[in-house]
Image (cartoon, coloured by chain):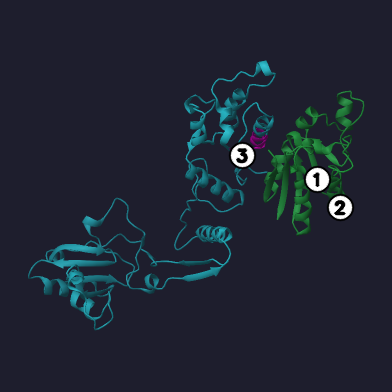
């Protein structure tokens, strides 16, 4: 089955975002595929390359990087949510004249059309948080 | 992405308009779907109904007016908008004044809409398209069951099995089969009706009750008219041969026997007999199979979870 995930949960509040990554890994292990993970609203903070987490808490970025690296999972941050949350890739950082990009390069910053496309192309959309 | 074959997505909205940014995000997602010509329906439930308050002014809190965005949705062909009626009642929201036209649903209607949306989103066959109260009505396509009907029944059984607790056995069977009758019902001719006081039964097990003294004429006339297409039998034969039970040789009770007519027309051909007092505006296409195997042999399928 082809899944896409819609992540609304902030990576720093509750466990929705980590559960989403766990779901993706588990689905792939069972032979399913993940068409795309779309991060919307507070979920877009998942792409932060500058957030720092306490040593006794799970890292919020690493599970996504592993999915992208091991399984070529496409990670897309909603651009309007990302901008509001200070999530800028290098293009957006230049466009808005900010000091540095804040989004990890494993993530793509793009529009809601990517969510619409994922909905059309997947058997299931699973929403985390919201 | 082709709009004709696109899935129709139901977006369930359950957050108040200004308490978080999720209300805005859900409308953005709906508008994006509309921009790509993907059909989308909205269902407001719980606190989400607060988005439908008629007069909203968010200027003082520095946010966009949510009601204004909602009012614009019909311009993007988002016009199937449903609301949990109980939630709207709980907040005393007058839906007639809502920013856009909405259809309130009771809980069983919401359950049907959710089931139907899941059905459609999984690419299941449908005979009717949303909008409307979404029930999976399956269109008839020619003789027998269509592929869509079979797939629909199969899906329903699968959904039921997946919801049953362990060690439950589900039995699927039927009380009778049916046959398809394409010809109009046969009108009984006048010389026969002259012997008939009234009729009972149904079109493919038609009982004729004789006028007093016409019992023998009724049987012989009926047999000459219909023996090529039906078993034409007297009440006595039906009782003697135990067509209606009890077992052969046992006596049918008088109270039951009195209800039978004098002559039964039981067609084995694909015909049906008209009773003007038992006809509606629409002719039935599917009918009882009388005593044919189509009627009598029903499937009996069992599965244990």
Chain ID of residue with mark 3: B
Please state the horizontal and vertical placement of residue B97, each as a whole percent of the image: 49, 24
Image height of B54 relative to B294, above or below: above
CA–CA distance in space, label 2 to label 1: 11 Å
Magenta segment: B29-41
Please state the horizontal and vertical placement of residue B58, each as a whole percent of the image: 64, 19
Instruction: Tell me, by letter, which chain the rendering colours cyan.
Output: B
Q: Are marks 2 and 1 on the same chain?
A: yes
Chain ID of residue with mark 1: A
**Residue farthest toward the bottom in the current orientation of the protein:** B249
Q: Are marks 3 and 1 on the same chain?
A: no
Q: Which residue is mark 2?
A: A70
**Residue farthest toward the top in the current orientation of the protein:** B60
CA–CA distance in space, label 3 to label 1: 23 Å
* Secondary structure under the numbered disc 3 in the rendered image: strand
Instruction: Tell me, by letter, which chain the rendering colours green.
Output: A
**Residue farthest toward the front in the current orientation of the protein:** A56
Left-right relation of A72 to B62: right
Q: Which residue is mark 1?
A: A74
Left-right relation of A81 to B156: right
Left-right relation of B209 to A61: left
* Residue A128 seen anywhere in this rendered image of the structure: yes
Q: Quadrant of the C terminus of chain A?
A: top right
Q: Residue at x 18, y 77 (%)?
A: B236
* Secondary structure under the numbered disc 1 in the rendered image: loop
Q: Which mark is residue B249?
A: none
Please state the horizontal and vertical placement of residue B120, each as a whole percent of the image: 58, 49
Q: Which mark is residue B11?
A: 3
Q: Residue at x 32, y 52 (%)?
A: B282
- Circle 3/circle 2 CB separation < 8 Å: no
Magenta span includes B39:
yes
Chain ID of residue with mark 2: A
């Amino acid at each position: 089955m082809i899944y896409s995930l819609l992540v609304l949960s902030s990576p720093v509040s509750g466990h929705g975002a980590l559960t989403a990554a766990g779901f993706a890994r588990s689905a792939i292990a069972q032979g399913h595929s993940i068409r795309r993970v779309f991060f919307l609203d507070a979920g877009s903070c998942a792409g932060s390359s500058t957030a720092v987490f306490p040593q006794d808490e799970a890292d919020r970025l690493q599970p996504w990087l592993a999915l992208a690296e091991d399984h070529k999972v496409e990670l897309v941050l909603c651009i309007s949510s990302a901008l509001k949350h200070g999530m800028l890739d290098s293009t957006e950082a230049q466009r808005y004249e900010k000091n540095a990009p804040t989004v990890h390069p494993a993530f793509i910053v793009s529009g809601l059309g990517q969510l619409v496309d994922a909905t059309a192309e997947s058997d299931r959309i699973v929403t985390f948080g919201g | 992405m082709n709009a004709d074959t696109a899935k129709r997505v139901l977006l369930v909205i359950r957050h108040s308009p200004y308490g978080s940014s999720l209300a805005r995000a859900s409308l953005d997602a709906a508008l994006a779907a509309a921009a790509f010509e993907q059909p989308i329906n909205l269902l407001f439930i719980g606190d989400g109904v607060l988005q439908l308050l008629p007069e909203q002014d968010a200027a003082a809190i520095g946010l966009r007016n949510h009601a204004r965005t909602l009012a614009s949705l019909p311009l993007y062909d988002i016009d199937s908008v449903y609301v949990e009626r109980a939630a709207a009642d709980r907040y005393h929201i007058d839906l007639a004044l809502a920013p856009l036209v909405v259809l309130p649903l009771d809980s069983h209607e919401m359950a049907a809409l959710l089931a139907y949306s899941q059905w459609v989103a999984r690419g299941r066959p449908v005979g009717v398209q949303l909008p409307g109260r979404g029930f999976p009505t399956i269109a008839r396509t020619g003789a027998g069951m269509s592929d869509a009907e079979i797939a629909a029944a199969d899906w329903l059984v699968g959904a039921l099995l997946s919801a049953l607790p362990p060690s439950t056995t589900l039995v699927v069977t039927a009380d009778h089969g049916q046959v398809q009758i394409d010809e109009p019902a046969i009108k009984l001719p006048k010389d026969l009706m002259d012997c008939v006081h009234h009729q009972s039964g149904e079109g493919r097990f038609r009982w004729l009750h004789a006028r007093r003294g016409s019992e023998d004429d009724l049987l012989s006339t009926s047999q000459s008219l219909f023996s090529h297409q039906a078993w034409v039998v007297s009440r006595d034969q039906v009782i003697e041969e135990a067509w209606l039970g009890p077992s052969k040789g046992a006596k049918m009770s008088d109270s039951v026997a009195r209800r039978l007519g004098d002559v039964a027309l039981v067609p084995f051909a694909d015909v049906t007999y008209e009773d003007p007092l038992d006809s509606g505006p629409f002719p039935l296409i599917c009918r009882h199979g009388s005593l044919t195997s189509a009627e009598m042999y029903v499937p009996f399928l069992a599965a244990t979870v």
